[in-house]
Amino acid sequence: MQNLKWPYENEFGQEEIVTSEILVLGGGLAGCYAAIAAARRGKSVVLVEKGATERSGSAGSGFDHWESACTNPCSQVSAQEIAEAYVNEQDGYSNGIGHYIECQEGYDRLLDMESFGGKIRDTEDEFAGAEFRDDETKLMFAYDYQNKFTLRVWGSTFKPALYKELLRLGVKVYDRTEATALMVEETNGRRRGIGATGMNVRTGKFLIFRAKETILAMSRPARIWLFHPDLVGLCEFRPMQSIGSGHAMGYRAGVAFTMMEKSVKAEFSSAGRSFPPYGTGNNHNTWYAATMVDARGVEIPYVNRDGVELKTVSERYYPAPGQKFFLKGGVIDNPKYEYRGPETLDFAELMRRGYQLPFYADLSRMPEMERKVIWGVMVGEEGKTKIPILKNYTERGFDPTQHMLQSYGNGWQSADFLPQERQLFGAPGGIITDWDLKTNIDGIYAAGDQLYASDCCGYACATGYYAGRKAAKAAEDVEYGEIDRAFCDAEKARLYHPMEVENGMDWRELNMAISKAMQNYCGGVKCRDLLNQGLELLEQYEREAVPQVGASNPHELMRAHEVFDILTVAKLILQACLLRESSSEPLCFSRSDFPEMDPPKDDCFITIRLDASGQVVRGTVPKGYFGDLKEEYEKRNADYVDGDARYRRG
């Protein structure tokens, strides 16, 4: 094979110092909105993104619905009702602050998006007259057609529109640049974030980003338990580069996390174990509420929360008699009776009644508009579905008016996963903040998937914008910190080391080893000995394997850095699991040495952080620490609640 020359300039060893009032790390939805909020308030803003901001992040290829747009003109519920439902549905292990911001400000961010050029309405009247469409506003709704707080949107149009707005506002975007470490200074015993370091993943240039306020808006962790070295691009539902570097950076810097012990059985991972997300027949989330049939073509009934069998497709989209609303999609792990919406009977009951595998999704039995909106809009706009699913299946002859798609696993999922194959899915752990979305370290904020119990796209946009405006306000009273030259030199040496290794280990080998270690020592059931053995093994990898990982170009170097961060997050998870000495049903957490389930002493958020010497510090925060959501929000956001449209919608 011909040796190809690396097409980008060699800038290894070169250094650039970039100064701005606000530094945003991560160019997904949360990061873009954080930068926009700060720029609107006249601050100089730098945004750092490992990929290309125009299409980066979990929403880069699109998404199909926008949850919790509770203030849209058709909504029949309040922000407080839905935010409190999210908290209650998770037995209190939920981020009330983030959810209230999502519910109160999410629709405002949609209107922003529309002004930027994103598509949020059926402007071509393709679905005129449909039950899920409001013909006056042309908004389209998902899941609950009575309460109308979740909108169907054309998410593939959003990131390009956001990128154009960033440039229009003068945000300086550093694409193809990975953030690698937070810079923190200490004065009079108090720590403060003063920026971050980074590296251009095409040229190798080292960058020092100096800022008054820094916003962490990167992805949740991934590739912790599941990784396939030969199918790297299919290892996650989210983009390959979204692996949790912000969590790793934050943990190393002393940022506090909570709920990192929580993990659920893996979903939407195609690491050699399942089919592409939403590429098989199912009836949840994007495909809700598709008609399901068994191998004989016998239709599988839906029942409401009271167990009453529903006779029509329309009934699947309405609450039961006496039920105010129901929750579907997004982070709803185990809906409680009060919030449970229409669903099919569980697998065991279907088997008892004689239904025969395999099951299929049969859209041909649904009304035309329902079929078109599932296969055309929802499947077409959800992440990683427009090309591999909608386009490819259609080109190969799939016709939803005639054909069915088989459902795998126990009838509903794209595959079944083993108990030891856990995942940070649903409403996972992450950074804990105050009402300003500020972390325990001054000058460092968090938004989107960096927050614990994070939600979907509306949550990312709303919390990102909120963090951006809070950081912008705080920057008015802050001076720039002093760069620690020794810290930067050490970070530069750490980043470049794999380029100096000859015939080194490939990054895939280390990622695979970490995943196997986590499966073996942090699976479905945990105990102290297993967790400690896992930590010892990961620390051995840190001492012995990390120095052997090699890279021959900046791209491979970036991949190596990602796996080093995966290793850090894996250690964080193991250490968090050791801190909770009980089992917990809401946290999907089981310990054989502490089988007591949800004892009062542990009925709280357990926090974890590293002190300045690198020692683990355990803390506790009571459930409901955020107080009355509406009251606490309004006392802190008078400028937004009572201000003019400039504050609310640009």
Image (cartoon, grey):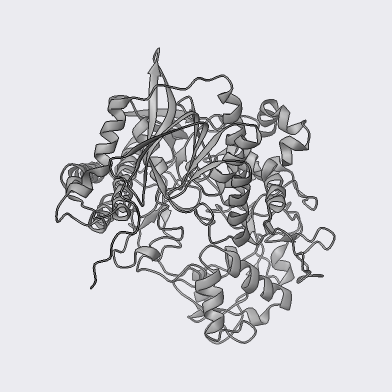
Q: Is residue 80 above or below residue 8?
A: above
Residue 329, can we see it? Answer: yes
Query: Where residue 372 appears, x then y in whole percent?
Result: 68, 75
Judge whether residue 615 can be spotted in this image. no
Q: Residue at x 70, y 73 (%)?
A: 370
Q: Residue at x 74, y 36 (%)?
A: 646
Q: Is residue 221 above or below residue 466?
A: below
Question: In the rendered image, which quarter contains the N terminus?
Answer: bottom left
Is 621 displayed left or right of 329 in the figure? left
Residue 601, image x and y in percent? Answer: 43, 31
Give the x, y percent position of residue 118.
67, 56
Question: In the rendered view, does 626 fall on the left or right side of 222?
Answer: right
Determine which quarter of the picture holds residue 143. Answer: bottom right
Q: Nearer the viewer, residue 516 or 612?
A: 612
Direction from residue 480 to residue 552 in the image, left or right: left
Nearest the viewer among 626 and 410 is 626
